[in-house]
Structure formats: structure tokens, C-alpha cells
Image (tube, grey):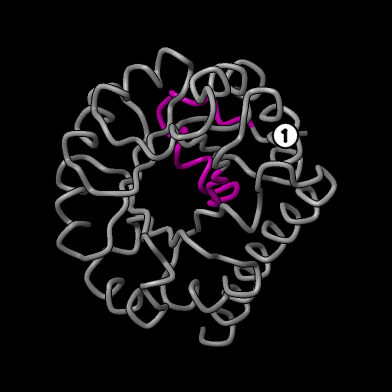
Amino acid sequence: MTDCVTPGSPGALQRALEACPLIAVLRWIGPDEAEDVTAILVDAGFRLIEVPLNSPQPYLSIERLARRFGDTAMIGAGTVMDPNDVPRVGAAGGRLIVMPHADVSVVRAARKHGFACFPGAATPTEGFAALAAGADGLKIFPAEAISPSVLKAWRAVFAREIPLLPTGGITPAAMSSWVDAGASGFGVGGNLYKPGKPLEEVRKSAIAFVEAWRATQMAEVRNTSRTT
């Protein structure tokens, strides 16, 4: 039985994050491949699916994914650069806006339409400005340039309930060090999906990411029990 997140309803984002706080970044995916790939991801446990707008026919992919998986996962767009793109995402059925930058005009547009929004931030200044504009959490990007030790410093000033999702070059093996530093989840892209990657390989990668995430949570529970 799959978890129902009922995207667009109150608490939908929180339920998706609690189920699996990994945003699948399906960069360059096309409409003909999108459904088969997303079926694998949802089956593995993913509940947040992003189709970057620089992919081929992104709105058609979003429409197909929202129609088929919208009761189980939050479907939306990434690489959203213009506030005018936000209503187009909504018209296609998307309810999730992910950005590579911290343009508050895009954040405000997402907020206006009631969509979950994760802007990209590379500094605390960008992060706090995006949150003040209505962001639901922050995509820490690019993670390759921001180490776990830097994120740990961020977490000292960002409240624990604010989702911080490192994105860029994330692998299953790297997740534990980021979680120890305060990561709430991750955006996962090229190590999960690339155009032409065989579906069975996508399945293996998806399972590896979900299992790695769950392992970090089990480790946190063990560590907490030792200190109480």
C-alpha cells in the first residue's frame, strides 16, 4: 500500500517529507520516458518528483506524471527561473517548485499559488531572504561547493524544523555525513537518473538512495537512545 500525500492539500508537503525527503531531479527527461521512470521511483519510496524546466517538453511530462501519480507523490518543476512559469506548472498539475537560485519573486509566486517551494541557496543570507518570502525549505546548492562542516554551521542558525536539502553530486554513501551535519533530506539527480539509463539501473539506484536515507534515520534513533 502506498502513502497518499494528496498534493495541494494542507500538510501534503510535510507528509511527503516524512515519508521520504528525497527530491528526484529528472533532468533532461522526456515525456515518453517520464512515466516509466517515475513508476520505479514511487515504488522505491520517492514522494517528491521534479521535472526541470530545461528538459524536453517539461510541462507535458509534469501533466502526465501529475495525472498518474498525483495521489501518491508531489509532482512539480525544477530550474524554475521566472515567476511567470509558476502558474504554467500549476496548469499542468504540478504542486512543487524547485529553483537553482533564491529569486524571491519566484518564491512569492509559488506562495501565491499555494505550491511547495524549495529555492536554491548558497549562503545563509540567500536562505533567510527566501524563507522570509515564503519558501518551505532550502535546496542547499551546489552541495559540491558546500561541505557538511559548512552545513553544520548553517544548522546552528537555521531552526531544526526548516528543511535543508543538499543537492548536487549526492551519493548514497555520502548521505550519512550530511545528515550528521543537519541535512533534512536531499535533492538527487545525476546519480539517480540520466537520459537513457536502463530502467533496471534506475531501480537499483532508487532503492540504494531510499535505503541509505532510512539507514541514516535508524542510526539517529540509535544515537538518541544511547544519550537518553
Q: Which residue is mark 1?
A: 2
Q: Is residue 205 left or right of residue 135?
A: right
Image point 25% across, 22% down: which residue? 84
| Viewer-nearest residue: 211 or 196 | 196
Residue 123 image point, x, y percent: 22, 65
Q: Quadrant of the N terminus?
A: top right
State the image coordinates of residue 99 (x, y, percent, origin top left).
34, 43
Label 1 residue SS? loop
Residue at coordinates 38% horizontally, 59% vertically from top-left?
164
Query: Residue 200: horizontal and vertical position, in percent?
Result: 85, 47
* Residue 3 picture quarter: top right
**Residue 42, horizontal then vertical, whole percent:** 70, 38
Assess whether residue 175 is covered by the magenta stretch: no
Q: Number of callouts in the render?
A: 1
Taking the magenta stretch, the answer to whether it contains residue 11 is yes
Hey, which quadrant is residue 38 in on the image?
top right
**183 up-or-down from 105: above or below:** below
